[in-house]
Image (tube, rainbow, N blue to C red):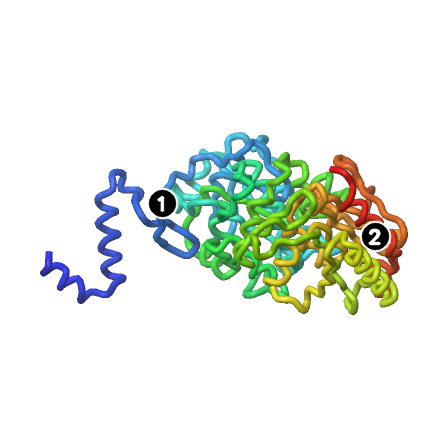
Amino acid sequence: MTLLWRRLRNFPVFVIAILLLVCLYTASDSGQEIRGNFMLWGEGLHTAANSRIHFSASTSIETTIPGGELVYGFGLLDRLYLRKGTFYIVTSTPSAFPQREHIIARPLDMGPDRDLSPTDKELQFIDPSEAATILGEQALTVEGFTLIAYDTEQFMHHFYHWWGEIILGAWRVYSALTGPSLSARDTTAPSFASRILLPHVFGQEWRDIPGLNAGLMRATFPSTSIENADQWDDLAVLDNTFVFERAMIVCRVAAQTHGLSKSWHKMISSTMAVNVSNTFWEPIRRTTVQNTIGYLPRLDSRGVIVSPPTVVSEMPFVTYIARQGSSRSLTDAYHQDLVRALKELEWSGLCQVYVAQMEKMSLTQQLEIMARSTILIGVHGNGLTHQLFMPPSPRSTVVEIFAPKGYVHDYAILARNLSHKHYAVWNDTLQTFPDGEWYEGVKYPSDFHSQSLPVYAPVIADLIRQRLSEPL
């Protein structure tokens, strides 16, 4: 043994690894797979406990829909095949699947009158009897769950579209199937995608300028690889077939073929038909907050922070995200009136108020203030996406200020997902909707993006008094 070790010491590490792999392969029962500590993951072999690498798998095994129903634009599939950049659904019953346009689209930027209807290049349905001829008899298995965001970067490099649509929508669909732990004190990392593939995104195009998309992904899913068009092309150039053990194709155009999306004009609309727990997002929120700021604030029914001891509060937090100077904002006079009204509430002992300029805060500071907040106020805009990390409670509230007569559903849908109460405000008028009811339509008046938006501060102050004082 000593002599063998002396000889092996002189070999390069990668040679020893190959020899070990060959020994394991020849010793396997089937000769088709290695059982042990190796896994096919993204670009190659990675070690992982209790995992397997399948050198081959029959292509005649049919594709299935876990849970039995495929969500438009968030298609979750078991045994999805890929060859030279084209997906294949192997099935003897094509009628069990939605039409192709509800699953995928041509990967081009959206635009007026642009036909993005999918072709055979994107996805094909084939019978198991055809599989060997089209795909070959064997496929390399990509283990685990793979999320495939099949869009261009057109909307992807935006905090709301990445986190508030792609990640939130995918998690809603996935959690309905897996039933994640919702223990009140569970902060373990959620089991989610092993990898995210971005077939039509190059370089850094999926990242937003403030760095929220990537930074929060690393905090929440530290073991998830994010692979762009380069890695996708590596798979496409091989004259080989891959089969994803479980995959979700996320496609904006396909999602918008759903009836709810035609009413709300939002990619995530199709997922709202999926029944989930009211706290389905909590494993994500808790993990993100814990891993970003180093602790998890816990609030009681009043919205008061009760732990950890170093951050306990006497009053609930109200956060106003100021957008002054941005493309959509209040006049300076209305902004000052609103700040004054909020500070008066603070002076009265009702709440603590934080006026946040997110663009001037670090990622950690942004998450920390949101994790402590019970009420979030802001003009319609990207900052309201931060409600993803605000703790849900009977008092948690999102107050969205619109241009008079304007309305879009972006942050109302987020609030419904997160169990926050959403209020739309048009100057001196506010409106909310009970579960099951929604604002009808979408309205973009000419001043929707104005820098001179009005708001009557006493209306918002009265709403905050009501939300923080009403009996539960």
Q: Quarter holding the C terminus?
A: top right
Above or below, comparing residue 94 to residue 87 in the picture: above
Q: What is the x, y in percent for residue 330?
A: 84, 63
Q: Helix, strand or loop at disc 2?
A: helix
Residue at coordinates 55% horizontally, 33% vertically from top-left? Answer: 67
The disc placed on residue 189 is none
Residue at coordinates 34% horizontally, 52% vertically from top-left? Answer: 47
Q: Amino acid at mark 1?
A: Ser
The crowd level at tag 2 (other Cα within 10 Å; few <14, some 14-19, many 20+) is many
Query: In terms of image quadrants, where is residue 359?
Result: bottom right
Q: What is the x, y in percent for residue 254?
A: 65, 45
Number of marks in the image?
2
Q: Helix, strand or loop at disc 1?
A: strand
Q: What is the x, y in percent for residue 63?
A: 49, 36
Q: Nearer the viewer, residue 78 or 81?
A: 78
Above or below, comparing residue 301 to residue 275 in the picture: below
Q: Nearer the viewer, residue 336 or 400?
A: 336
Question: For mark 2, what is the residue?
Answer: 460
Q: Nearer the viewer, residue 178 or 373?
A: 373
Q: What is the x, y in percent for residue 347?
A: 79, 58
Question: For mark 1, what is the residue?
Answer: 51
Q: Nearer the viewer, mark 1 or mark 2?
A: 2
Above or below, comparing residue 292 to residue 260 in the picture: below
Q: Amino acid at mark 2?
A: Ile
Query: In terms of image quadrants, where is residue 457?
Result: bottom right
Circles 1 and 2 in contact, beta carbons < 8 Å: no
Residue at coordinates 81% horizontally, 48% vertically from top-left? Answer: 465
Decide if residue 77 is in sight here: yes
Q: Is residue 421 left or right of residue 45?
A: right
